[in-house]
Image: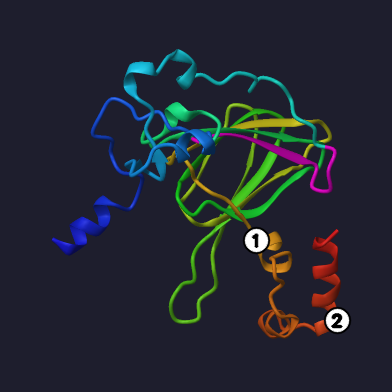
Amino acid sequence: MALLSSLAIASDPSPLQDFCVAINDPKTAASFFNAVFVNGKICKDPKVVNANDFFFQGLNIPRSTANRQGSNVTAVNVNNLAGLNTLGVSLARLDFAPYGLNPPHTHPRATEVLFVLEGTLNVGFVTSNPPNNMKNQLFTKTLNPGDVFVFPEGLIHFQFNVGKTNAVAFAGFGSQNPGVITIANAVFGSDPLISADVLAKAFQVDKKVIDLLEAQFLK
């Protein structure tokens, strides 16, 4: 029974009503004293819910990739589409400049399904730490338009545009709010910073290398 219970709550819980449109305005939410939170959000009164609560537009518009990574992720989740609350799904548009990278990251609350619309992407994920001092395994594939690839929940993964033209992909997630942890940002750009002594020991490099990396992420 304990095992079954733990499996039952491994993902977003199933809704017990048709919908629970989130109230994302903090001022409005604050006015609901002793309100019930569902998945961390207060539900809008169903009597005042309308079609716009389930509507988002503009995902057809390319986003700027003029940054150091040459990529841009436009997320559509419960924070900007309130009707997703309790429904357990969300999506994102990914734009890549030539040789642009969506760097190694993880979604702690969702499996991701990626569909390539334009361009050629090299993608991959790494397994969790195996037993008996075995190495983490990399699963990687080069994707073309029409191809689909799955990244299991919580595992580190990446997408890299290996083409000379822009690339566009769309991702679906098994959570209304999958979360994202960009590995390099979290390790070298946290606030406050992780001790350089800790990171130098973990990566088996000179402390000066860590200082340089942390300075890069503070820019």
Identify the residue at image location x=41%, y=45%. Answer: 40
- Residue lying at the far left in this picture: please name it: 1
* Left or right of 157 on screen, residue 37: left
Question: Residue 37 at x, y = what percent?
Answer: 35, 43
Mark 1 and mark 2 lie on one chain; the one further toward the N terminus is 1
Which quarter of the picture shows residue 87?
A: top left
Q: Is residue 166 visible?
A: yes
At a point 69% along the width and 86% down the height, the residue shown is: 201
Q: Residue furthest top?
A: 51
Q: Is residue 76 magenta?
A: yes
Q: Quadrant of the N terminus?
A: bottom left
- At label 2, counting other C-alpha atoms closer than 10 Å, the crowd grade (few under 14, some 14-19, many 20 or more) is few
Q: Which colour style is shown? A: rainbow
For residue 208, the mark is 2
**Looking at the picture, which amino acid does disc 1 mark?**
Ile
x and y, in percent, of residue 125 in the image: 56, 54
Q: Is residue 1 above or below residue 59?
A: below
Q: Which of the 4 image quadrants contains residue 63?
A: top right
Labelled disc at residue 183:
1
Which residue is painted at 60% across and 51% down in the image?
124
> Can you tell which quarter of the image residue 166 is in?
top right
Residue neighbourhood size for the residue with mark 1, other residues' Cα within 10 Å, grouped as few (<14), some (14–19), many (≥20): some
Determine the CA span between mark 1 and mark 2.
20 Å
Q: Amino acid at mark 2?
A: Lys
Please state the horizontal and vertical placement of residue 7, each as a whole percent of the image. Answer: 26, 55
Against 201, residue 5 (above or below) is: above
Residue 35 among magenta residues: no
Query: Above or below — where is 56 with respect to 80?
Result: above
- In this picture, which residue range is highlighted in magenta? 66-78
Residue 149 image label: none
Q: Secondary structure at mark 2?
A: helix
